[in-house]
Image: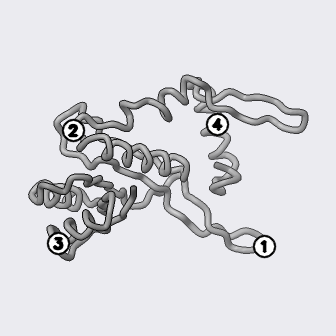
């Protein structure tokens, strides 16, 4: 996080110590430096658990494949992504993504952009629509997320699905991404 996202050193070290204490990281030494590795238990819990990226209310294998790809992209970008696993009855987006705000940080030589670990952008609700057979459900998905104040992105598998979705919703507060 320090090198890749320009978090300040004290925040990065605090995060590392927390993850070490939780057993999610382990420290290793090379000749020149200390580096950190994710423990196998943390990999299993956070990066390979199928329950964390598959919803019981999902639309099928294509839906789950797209959810997995998106979640992996969000994790690799350093975002926090919550997947609706269907474990409760609360109405949630398929994926809710939290991104740190980017702030300008003046330094001696120049001003640079860095991610703020304290400030977060408006959450983005991702709704994966692979069947697009229920216009009412698509409209409900948009309404529930807009009401909660989220930005809304629909993810569809092809241009035909995108056209159907846009016809169903018309103009509005959402965007559409085609992802196979």
Query: Sequence-wise, which precedes: disc 4 or disc 1?
Result: 4
Quarter occupied by residue 163? bottom left
Does the CB distance between marks 4 and 1 fall below 8 Å? no
Residue holding disc 4: 16
Q: Earlier in the sequence, mark 3 or mark 2?
A: 2
Q: Secondary structure at mark 3?
A: helix
Describe residue 106's horizontal placement relative to residue 42 as left or right.
right
Kindly identify which residue carries mark 3: 167
Spatial distance from mark 3 to mark 4, Cα to Cα?
48 Å
* Front: mark 3 or 1: 3
Taking the view exactly as shown, the residue that stands out farthest to the bottom is: 171
Task: Using residue 136 as the reference point, say whether residue 161 is left or right of it.
Answer: right
Q: Residues within 10 Å of mark 3 (few under 14, many from 20)?
A: few
Circle 3/circle 1 CB separation < 8 Å: no
Q: Give the residue drawn at x 63%, y 28%.
A: 20
Give the numbered dot on residue 57: 2
Mark 4 and mark 3 in contact (Cβ < 8 Å)?
A: no
Kindly report which numbered mark, 2 or 1, lies closer to the viewer in this rendering: 2
- Give the number of the mark in front: 3 or 4: 3
Whichever of callouts 3 and 4 sits on the residue coming sooner in the sequence is 4
Whichever of callouts 3 and 1 sits on the residue coming sooner in the sequence is: 1
Q: Secondary structure at mark 1?
A: loop
CA gap, disc 2 to disc 1? 52 Å
Given residues 9 and 62, the one toward you in this image is: 62
Quadrant of the drawing holding the C terminus: bottom left
Per the image, the residue denoted by label 1 is 109
Alpha carbons under labels 3 and 1: distance apart: 51 Å
Work out how far the residue at label 4 is from the one at label 1, CA to CA, in angstroms. 28 Å
């Amino acid at each position: 996080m320090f090198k890749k996202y320009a978090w300040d050193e004290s925040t990065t070290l605090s995060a590392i110590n927390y993850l070490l204490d939780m057993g999610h990281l382990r420290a290793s030494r090379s000749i020149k430096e200390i580096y950190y590795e994710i423990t196998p238990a943390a990999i299993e819990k956070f990066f390979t658990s199928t329950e964390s990226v598959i919803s019981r209310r999902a639309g099928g294998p294509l839906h789950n494949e797209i959810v997995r790809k998106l979640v992996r992209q969000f994790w690799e970008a350093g975002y926090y992504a919550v997947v609706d696993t269907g474990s409760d009855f609360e109405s949630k987006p398929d994926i809710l993504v939290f991104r740190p705000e980017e702030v300008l940080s003046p330094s001696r030589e120049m001003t640079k952009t860095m991610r703020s670990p304290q400030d977060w952008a408006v959450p983005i609700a991702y709704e994966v629509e692979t069947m697009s057979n229920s216009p009412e459900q698509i409209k409900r998905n948009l309404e529930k997320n807009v009401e909660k104040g989220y930005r809304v992105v629909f993810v569809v598998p092809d241009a035909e699905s995108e056209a159907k979705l846009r016809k169903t919703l018309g103009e509005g507060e959402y965007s559409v991404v085609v992802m196979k």
